[in-house]
Each structure stands twice: as structure tokens, then as C-alpha cells.
Image: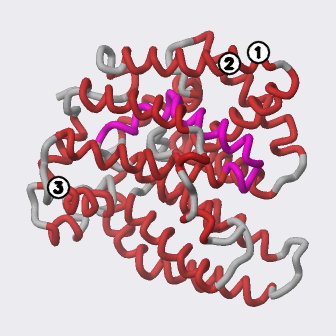
């Protein structure tokens, strides 16, 4: 697939009803949810000059990239609905990117189911209405994955470098995805394809050194202070909390069992068993990110953050989509039943979120 294919997407080629259904839920939350604590902090930060925001000194817990983007967006208006509209646009981009990546990785049918699971995902519903960096973090991860696949060209290498660098400055959660990606890229240098090994090794090494030289100083200057701002996450590294959170079922225990079974079915079916490089890439990055974050949090300092591990949520969607694809081939009634459970779960969260936001790590001022 050529790079121009993404640009040529027509909306009618995607599951429009799923997109509209997910959009309506998100619009409801945009209107219904009050400004929460982190959004209130964001509004105060936007009162500063653009150059002050670019410096990164106003919030050590997050790099300045998202705030710069939102500051530019706020030149038109600082109204809450307008600021949240920026996130709805990112939802649209994520939908299209996921559809393309799904088709590339596992075929068109899985791509259609993938965007359905995203539209009604209980995990991503928590982010896709608020003006914070999490939906945009998903966008950068998906764009990076899209560019990572396929034959490398000079243009693609340059585009990947710019996207990954922008992602590192957008949110620290991108690091958790990016470092395992580099490890995978290095391992692929010595894979079955023996052509241009030296060139590929030099390209990856040079890129990594450039990332360090450009982004590294900012990270070093803010790392220690930034960690002090996320000490609260140590209370949410319990598997009984974060597994349902990633599954998108939260406190719906029955749904948690169903969704966990669906993930297991997706993994142990031909999603990863056929040694599909793209699928294994997702699983490798997710497990590495999850395990590393948990070990750091349990052994050293609080580091595990369910909001920042978007790559885990994305991989869960892939497992859902592949499992549903297999079910449609084996038992359509069961597949449609699970489809309906996804929708019911999304509606439950849509109604529960404004009433009990604390269940979803959202604190009202």
C-alpha cells in the first residue's frame, strides 16, 4: 500500500454508523460533563503567553506539545465546548487511522470491526470528550504505527522521525510506546531480510541519537519534578482496577469477564499465532510497556498511569476486532450479542460518567 492511500480514504468506505454512534456519545459527554480538575488547570495554563507554554516550565508532569496546540486552537475561543471540539476532531482522525491500520494489519473486515470497538470503547470514551492530551496521544501513536509498516523510503523515514519527535513532545505517554518500538525496529534489522542491514542499523541509530539530542535535555530538566506530580497513580496499579479499565468495562463485572475472554480469544486465535509481524508488534509493545511501567511503580517510584498507556488500549481493540471477526465466521448470533454488549456498555458509561466521575479517575473541582 502506498502512502497516498491514507489521503484517498472516502468516508463512505468506513462504517459510518459506528462513527456517528460514537460521535453522538462523545457529544453528549461534551455537553453534559462539567469542567473537571485537569481541564480547569489547562484553562489557567492557556492564560500564559505562547512562548511561556513552549518553554515547558508551566507543567513538569506533561511536555508542552499539547498545550501549544490547544493554545493555538484557543485563539478563536476559550469556551469549554470549543476547546473540547478539538478532541472530537482528533476522534475523527483516530477513527480513520484505525480503519487504515486495521486493513493493513489484518484485512478490511477487521478494520471495520476495529473502528466499531473504538467508537464504543469504554476505555477511549473516558478521553475523547475532554480537552486533555490523551486522545491526541492516541493520534500520534496511530500515525507512528501507520508510517512504521511497509517498505521504508526516504520520505517515510523523514515523516516517521517528525511524527515520533512531535509525539515525544506531545505527552510523556508516548515514551512508553516509543522505546519498545525502537527495540522492535532494532531487532527487525537482523531479521529475515538481510538487505541493507548496515544502512538500516545506521538509520535507526542516527535517529535515536537525534531524538536524544533534541528531546533529551527537556526530559532531563523536568523528569524528577514531573514524577512528583503523579505520585497518586500508585493507588491505581492494582490489577483489579487497571484490567477492567483497559478493557473498558470498569465496574461492570460481568462485562469484564466477557471482554477479557474476547481479548484472550483474539490473542490465541490467528491474530498472533500466525506470527503476523504487525500483530506481534502491537502485543510486544503493549506487554513491554505494561510490565515495565508496573515494575517501576512497584519497585521504585509511582510511574504506572492507565491514561498514558494508550498503546495497551489500542492493542485491546485489535484483539476485540479479530475475535469478533472469527465469531462472525463461526457463530453470528453470538457475535451480534457481543456487539450489542459493547453498545450497552458504552451507554452505561455515558450515563454513569457524569454521576460518578471518580470511578473513571476524573476529579471535579
Mark 2, residue position: 338
Distance of label 1 from label 2 (alpha carbons): 6 Å
User: Disc 3 versus disc 2: distance between alpha carbons?
Assistant: 40 Å
**x%, y% of residue 270?**
87, 41
Q: Which region shows up in magenta?
A: 102-130
What colouring style does the render use? secondary structure
Residue topped by disc 3: 74
> Which image quadrant is residue 298 in?
top right
Q: Main secondary structure of the magenta part?
A: helix
**To which residue does mark 1 refer?**
334
Q: Is residue 284 magenta?
A: no
**SS assignment at label 1:** helix
Residue 226 placement (x, y as % from top left):
33, 54
Q: Quadrant of the C terminus?
A: top left
10 Å crowding of disc 2: few (<14), some (14-19), many (20+):
some
- What's the CA distance linking mark 1 and mark 3? 46 Å
| Element on which disc 3 rests | loop
* Point 59% across, 83% down: residue: 155
**In the rendered picture of this protein, how many numbered marks are placed on residues?**
3
Amino acid at each position: 500500500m502506498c502512502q497516498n492511500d491514507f489521503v484517498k480514504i472516502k468516508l463512505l468506505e468506513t462504517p459510518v454508523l459506528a462513527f456517528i454512534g460514537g460521535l453522538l456519545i462523545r457529544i453528549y459527554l461534551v455537553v453534559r460533563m462539567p469542567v473537571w480538575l485537569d481541564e480547569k488547570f489547562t484553562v489557567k495554563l492557556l492564560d500564559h503567553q505562547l512562548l511561556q507554554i513552549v518553554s515547558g516550565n508551566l507543567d513538569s508532569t506533561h511536555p508542552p506539545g499539547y498545550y501549544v496546540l490547544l493554545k493555538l486552537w484557543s485563539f478563536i475561543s476559550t469556551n469549554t465546548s470549543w476547546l473540547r471540539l478539538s478532541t472530537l476532531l482528533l476522534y475523527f482522525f483516530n477513527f480513520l487511522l484505525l480503519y487504515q491500520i486495521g486493513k493493513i494489519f489484518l484485512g478490511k473486515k477487521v478494520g471495520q470491526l476495529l473502528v466499531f470497538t473504538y467508537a464504543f470503547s469504554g476505555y477511549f470514551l473516558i478521553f475523547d470528550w475532554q480537552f486533555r492530551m490523551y486522545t491526541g496521544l492516541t493520534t500520534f501513536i496511530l500515525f507512528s504505527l501507520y508510517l512504521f509498516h511497509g517498505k521504508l523510503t526516504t520520505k517515510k523515514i523523514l515523516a516517521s522521525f517528525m511524527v515520533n519527535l512531535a509525539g515525544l513532545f506531545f505527552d510523556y505517554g508516548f515514551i512508553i510506546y516509543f522505546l519498545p518500538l525502537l527495540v522492535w525496529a532494532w531487532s527487525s534489522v537482523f531479521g529475515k531480510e538481510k538487505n541493507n542491514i548496515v544502512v538500516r542499523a545506521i538509520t535507526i541509530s542516527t535517529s535515536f541519537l537525534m531524538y536524544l539530542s533534541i528531546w533529551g535535555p527537556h526530559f532531563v530538566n523536568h523528569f524528577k519534578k514531573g514524577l512528583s506530580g503523579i505520585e497518586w497513580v500508585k493507588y491505581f496499579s492494582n490489577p483489579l482496577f487497571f484490567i477492567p479499565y483497559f478493557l473498558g468495562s470498569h465496574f461492570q463485572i460481568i462485562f469484564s469477564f466477557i471482554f477479557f475472554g474476547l481479548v484472550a480469544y483474539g490473542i490465541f486465535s490467528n491474530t498472533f499465532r500466525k506470527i503476523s509481524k504487525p500483530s506481534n508488534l502491537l502485543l510486544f509493545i503493549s506487554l513491554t510497556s505494561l510490565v515495565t511501567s508496573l515494575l517501576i511503580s512497584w519497585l521504585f517510584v509511582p510511574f504506572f498511569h492507565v491514561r498514558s498507556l494508550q498503546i495497551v488500549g489500542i492493542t485491546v481493540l485489535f484483539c476485540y476486532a479479530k475475535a469478533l471477526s472469527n465469531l462472525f465466521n463461526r457463530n453470528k448470533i453470538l457475535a451480534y450479542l457481543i456487539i450489542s454488549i459493547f453498545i450497552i456498555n458504552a451507554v452505561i458509561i455515558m450515563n454513569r460518567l457524569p454521576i460518578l466521575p471518580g470511578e473513571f479517575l476524573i476529579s471535579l473541582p
